[in-house]
Image: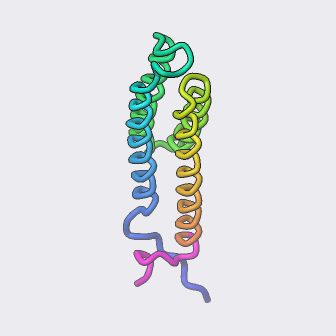
Amino acid sequence: MTEPVRPPATDPMKGIRGVFAATLILEAIVVLLALLVLSKFGDGATPLSTSLVVGVAVLMIVGSGLQRRSWGLTFALVMQAVTIVVGFVFVPVLGVMGVVFALVFGALMLMRRDVARKMARGELPSQQG
């Protein structure tokens, strides 16, 4: 008879959500740094472009606090798409950084999947005992 899988003592997904939140904060910093070069691209630092860049950064900061919600990860992934679009429309370098952060989020999603699979099989160190 197979022994039931014991849940881990601590929630490993809580740590992963923290990594997602921290990544969003780092991305918000990068987005805000785009303001320094915004005047050198296209029409320059227009009120619209400045507002969009600041708005995206603020939404990322808010999104970092929403990672504990069931839809927080979806919000973070949508922010990746928004960053890429706003970046390529106003600051091409920001669009490239949006792609880089989207790849980072992809790698984090793979890590999350791996932890979930190990947790389901009872293979996490905190489940051994």
Q: Residue at x 39, y 32 (%)?
A: 33
In the image, farthest residue toward the top: 47
Q: Residue at x 53, y 56 (%)?
A: 108
In front of the other: 127 or 32 = 32
Figure quadrant of residue 36: top left
Whole-percent x and y of residue 54?
A: 42, 23
Whole-percent x and y of residue 90?
A: 56, 22
Q: Residue at x 54, y 50 (%)?
A: 105
In the image, farthest residue toward the front: 40
Figure quadrant of residue 107: bottom right
Left or right: residue 40 versus residue 110 is left
In front of the other: 59 or 84 = 84
In front of the other: 28 or 127 = 28
> Is residue 101 shown above or below 110?
above
Residue 127 is one of the magenta-drawn residues = yes
> Is residue 65 shown above or below 43?
below
Whole-percent x and y of residue 80?
A: 56, 38
Residue 47 is one of the magenta-drawn residues = no
Left or right: residue 47 versus residue 77 is left
Whole-percent x and y of residue 78?
A: 58, 36
Q: Which residues are magenta?
A: 120-129
Figure quadrant of residue 77: top right
Q: Residue at x 40, y 58 (%)?
A: 15
